[in-house]
Image (cartoon, rainbow, N blue to C red):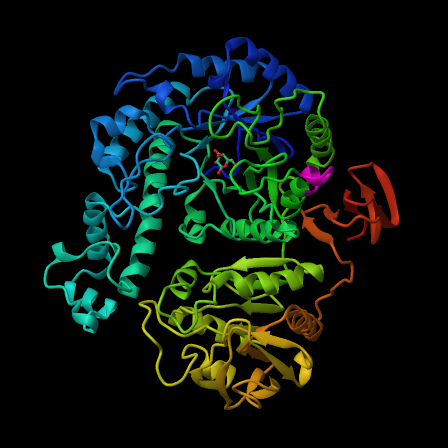
Amino acid sequence: MTAWPVHPDGTRLPGVAYGGDYNPEQWPREVWDEDVRLMREAGVTVATVGVFSWALLEPAEGHFELDWLADVLDLLHANGIAVDLATGTASPPPWLSHHYPETLPRQADGTVLWPGGRQAWCPSSPVYRERSLALVSALAERFHGHPALVMWHVSNELGGHNSRCYCDVTAQAFRGWLRQRYGDLDVLNEAWGTAFWSQRYGDWDHVLPPRSAPTFPNPTQQLDFARFGSDALLECFVAERDLLHRISPGVPVTTNFMIMSHVRDMDYLRWGPELDVVSQDHYLEAHDPDAHVELAWSADLTRGTADGRPWFLMEHSTSAVNWQPRNVPKAPGQLARNSLAHVARGSDAVCFFQWRASRAGAEKFHSALLPHGGTDTRVWREVVELGRTLRAIGEVAGTTVRGDVAVVVDWDARWAAELDSHPTQDLTYLDRHHALYRALWDAGVTVDMVRPDDDLDGYRLVLVPTLYLTTDAAATNLAGYVEAGGTALVTYWSGIVDGHDHVRLGGYPGAFRELLGITTEEFFPLREGQEVRLSGGVLDGTTADVWTELLHATSAEVVSSYDDGPLAGVPALTRRRVGDGTAWYLATRTDPAGTTALVRQLCADVGIATHDLPGVEVVRRSGETASYLFVLNHTDAAVEVPVRGTDLVTDRACPGTVKVAAGGVAVVREEGH
Ligand code: GAL
């Protein structure tokens, strides 16, 4: 299978690809000539075309009009710009739901989501799937041999607005999925714990999606519906991909992920292996002054879904977006910093939504490479400058990133951890992920995100935050890693339930009790705003909130304990030596000082170097013959970082350090590394 966007003649898209979504159908023909001229000026190498073009490509059912798209592809090709061709299936034309109203999605309370926005389709609808595949087929037949084509782009952000549908068509598909999973209704009854609240099913037809109910719907039903919903969208991708592989062999197929903290409905760690190239969209949260740390987290998780291979940044923004409550533009220099942060963490592309800012429609106030104000604008100047920088660092493409620390991520655990009727509503799955990640980011330590049953060998440190749902395989994997000499930290609300969301009995956390040498008899979540003080060991003098637990160290040593609160004197942090390995357990939600102290201690214990350069991001990409140190200065003062080599951005020698201006970037090809 092809692993990276390639021309049909077999050549790889060179360097770091640069470009974005191009929607020429919104503009008169004469504007297209200006578009390609300016694309060349900016150094654009790839355009994503046709993302929302279904209504123009198939104006009436079965009637295709593809000539205008052929003109666009020809024009781009004549100007040396490669095409990532979208299948256009993200947003059906109005005729689809007019003729087939059953394709419209419904919310849990039965509300229909009508057309008029985008993505108004039920992911399980056989009619939608049939009509979308007819379009894909027509496009692939027409364009599979086009010399501009380097990649197929299935749909767009699958599940962005329609990830969960609760309609009758979905109900039937959900039953089919459950039959495959459980085979027998008794097995489903057991898995869902339906002896509780008189929920036992005697007939498959009585099983429904977890629609709005008088009180908490069955948790395992909710969990299975989350799994099913993600699988249903993945099936849409796979159906298009298989068709494209058949009609357009050799051209890689992608679909753009949305790995951002607020998106939780798609299990991208499961999707990743199905894509020829993993591509990803990322938008900063304008309210977060440290949004670049969330960006780094997202980029590392994207690399995790790609199993470490280079990935493709399909979308981000040159400046403000239009869909947040307050859409703050990027500061000067931030466009380059954000772009290079993605590249530093494994992207071989820097693409944007979108090429030219729209005049009409819901996204007319979204930034673009070419703003409403044209080329005499600061955004355009930064866009041209970025094109130059990406050409200068082109040789980094194809190199990879390897983290020192592995963080275990699992979407089943996320879905299950955040179900209702839990000990506290203040606990969210990503909370400890972000806290630990932040401490590592500050320390300049690069993280790989791994699945619970991935090979952990070779990592000096493994962090396991909030793995509430833990399979036997995951528990065995972690125990094996520690027994073989590894160091692991498990945080609270991990190892509590099995894959069906059934409690592991005999003392919490059932999956890790033995490995950690502890047992917890009762959870003691704290009241809103309540804090407890910690003493002893690395957490001495710090505070914690949200979560505590009545924990006994059975074979672990106690490192830190609560000083006050409901559990004064009870262990909060423990450590158990297992041969050459060490298993730590953190039972409470430490404040940033505590989390930082703990993370730095763990790094020191296992010999991982840390730095003290607040706000400076340092990441290495390595290839067979060279390595590259990315230095991104997010502060407003110049910094100096030790490194020997040549800064590709400025083409200056770095005889022992590189000096990076306030807000600036450097990419140093290292000597002797
Ligand atoms: C993405 C989407 C684009 C555009 C962009 C705006 O989610 O794929 O089509 O809507 O957001 O930020």
Which quarter of the rendering shows the N terminus?
Answer: top left
- In percent of width and height, residue 227 lies at 33, 55
Q: Identify which residue is drawn at 51% across, 61% down.
A: 430
Whether residue 69 appears in magenta in the rendering, the answer is no
| Magenta stretch: includes residue 333 | yes
Residue 405: % across, % down: 61, 64
Q: Is residue 342 above or below residue 430?
A: above
Residue 278 is left or right of residue 594, and the answer is left
Q: Position of residue 105 (x, y in %)?
A: 28, 40
Is residue 264 shown above or below 106?
A: below
Looking at the image, which is closer to me, 309 or 163?
Answer: 163
Is residue 180 shown to the viewer in this render? yes
- Residue 364 located left or right of residue 646: left
Instruction: Count up the numbered dots.
Output: 0
The residue lying at 61 percent from left, 39 percent from top is 348
Residue 454 in sight here = no
Residue 318 is left or right of residue 61, and the answer is: right
Residue 133, percent from left and from top: 30, 30
Identified at 51% across, 79% down, the residue is 548
Residue at the outermost left position: 202
Compare residues 159 and 484 and report the one nearer the observer.
159
Q: Which residues are magenta?
A: 330-337
**120 and 138: which one is in front?**
120
Give the camera-side residue of 311 and 519. 519
